[in-house]
């Protein structure tokens, strides 16, 4: 039986090479670090955004869609909670991984918000992000 989120992703990638990922974080170092980790895990198509509003622009400009987003919770202008609200409004149907340095209580609250908004939440990852934390989450998708 396919995972429950299989029906929510319009075109499911057949491999990590086909996976289109959008990273959303206001820290350029984190964007570079996570991009390199994903590349090392076989993900070839990684797009980055330094803010929630920039991510929404990139999402709307992606004709094939985004299979997976990794989002930070603490960002100026539009935090991760507000960003998830915006994603729900535009009907995002891909998967999410929440990446943050926030407390366990905040991460749990973010997980609950993602689930209540019916996102496909693959999991949460504490910063600093490591390959061993991302690999099993990616395996849930491809």
Image: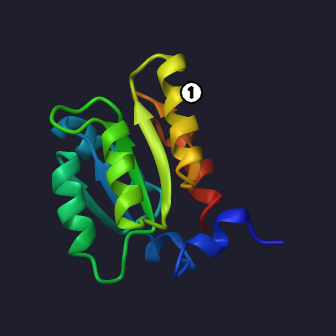
Vertical order, 37 against 109 (above or below): below
Question: Which residue lies at the image location 25% right of the left edge and 44% below the top edge?
Answer: 31
Mark 1: few/some/many CA within 10 Å (<14, 14-19, 20+): few
Q: Nearer the viewer, residue 4 or 38?
A: 4
**What residue did someone put label 1 on?**
108
Q: Position of residue 64 (x, y in %)?
A: 35, 82
Question: Which residue lies at the image location 53% right of the left edge and 28% below the top edge?
Answer: 109
Q: Position of residue 68 (x, y in %)?
A: 45, 61
Left/right of residue 70 with respect to residue 33 in the rendered view:
right
Q: Quadrant of the N terminus?
A: bottom right
Left/right of residue 85 with respect to residue 12 in the rendered view:
left
Q: Farthest residue toward the front?
A: 89
Vertical order, 35 against 107 (above or below): below
**Residue 89 occupies quadrant:** bottom left
Q: Quadrant of the C terminus?
A: bottom right
Q: Nearer the viewer, residue 106 or 124?
A: 106
């Amino acid at each position: 039986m396919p995972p429950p989120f299989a029906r929510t992703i319009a075109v499911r990638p057949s491999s990590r090479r086909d996976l289109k990922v959008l990273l959303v974080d206001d820290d350029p170092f984190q964007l570079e670090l996570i991009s390199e980790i994903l590349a090392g895990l076989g993900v070839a198509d990684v797009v980055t955004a330094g803010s929630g509003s920039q991510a929404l622009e990139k999402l709307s400009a992606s004709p094939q869609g985004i299979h997976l987003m990794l989002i930070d919770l603490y960002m100026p202008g539009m935090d991760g909670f507000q960003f998830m609200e915006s994603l729900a409004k535009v009907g995002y149907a891909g998967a999410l991984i929440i990446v943050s340095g926030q407390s366990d209580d905040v991460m749990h609250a973010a997980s609950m918000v993602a689930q209540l908004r019916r996102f496909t939440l693959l999991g949460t990852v504490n910063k600093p992000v490591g390959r061993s934390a991302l690999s099993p989450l990616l395996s849930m998708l491809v």
